[in-house]
Image: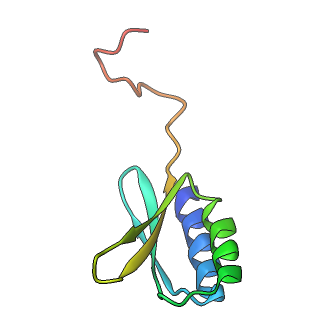
Amino acid sequence: MPASGVSAAAIAARLSDIGLPARVEEHDRYASVQAEVPESLPADLWREVLEVVAEADRFGLLATSLNDCTLWAVVHKAVPTTGDVGGPSHQR
């Protein structure tokens, strides 16, 4: 598993420990974590949640008009540092 997947899994595990079951999805350039947030999440738990997702490269909260809230976090995969990453037309 890439380092991004390990980091995303750790974030998901910590969110689950707080009481927000989370799921991880692997994508080409990043791993994402999503968790449904109950409307009645206490303020002290919000602080813990923010500490956890602050470890991601990006995070946010998607709220709908139906009072559904989904917390998301993204951990970017590392860009290769060797090889011909620019392709054949890349000028050096």
Query: In percent of the image, x 30 and y 18: which residue is there?
Result: 88
Query: In percent of the image, x 35 and y 53: which residue is there?
Result: 28
Of 13 and 15, nearer the camera is 15
- Tell whether 80 sits left or right of 47: left
> Looking at the picture, how far across and down is residue 61, in whole percent?
45, 67
> Looking at the picture, how far across and down is residue 21, in whole percent?
51, 87
- Tell whether 75 sits left or right of 50: left
Task: Specify the farthest residue to the top.
Answer: 92
Of 10 and 70, nearer the camera is 70
Colouring used for the render: rainbow
How many dots with numbers?
0
> Looking at the picture, how far across and down is residue 92, in whole percent?
44, 9
Query: In percent of the image, x 49 and y 38: which residue is there?
Result: 79
Q: Quadrant of residue 12?
A: bottom right
Query: In percent of the image, x 53 and y 90: which residue is there?
Result: 40
Q: Quadrant of residue 50?
A: bottom right
Residue 2 appears anywhere in the view: no
- Tell whether 58 sits left or right of 53: left
Residue 13 appears anywhere in the view: yes
Q: Is residue 51 above or below residue 41?
A: above
Q: Is residue 38 above or below residue 35?
A: below
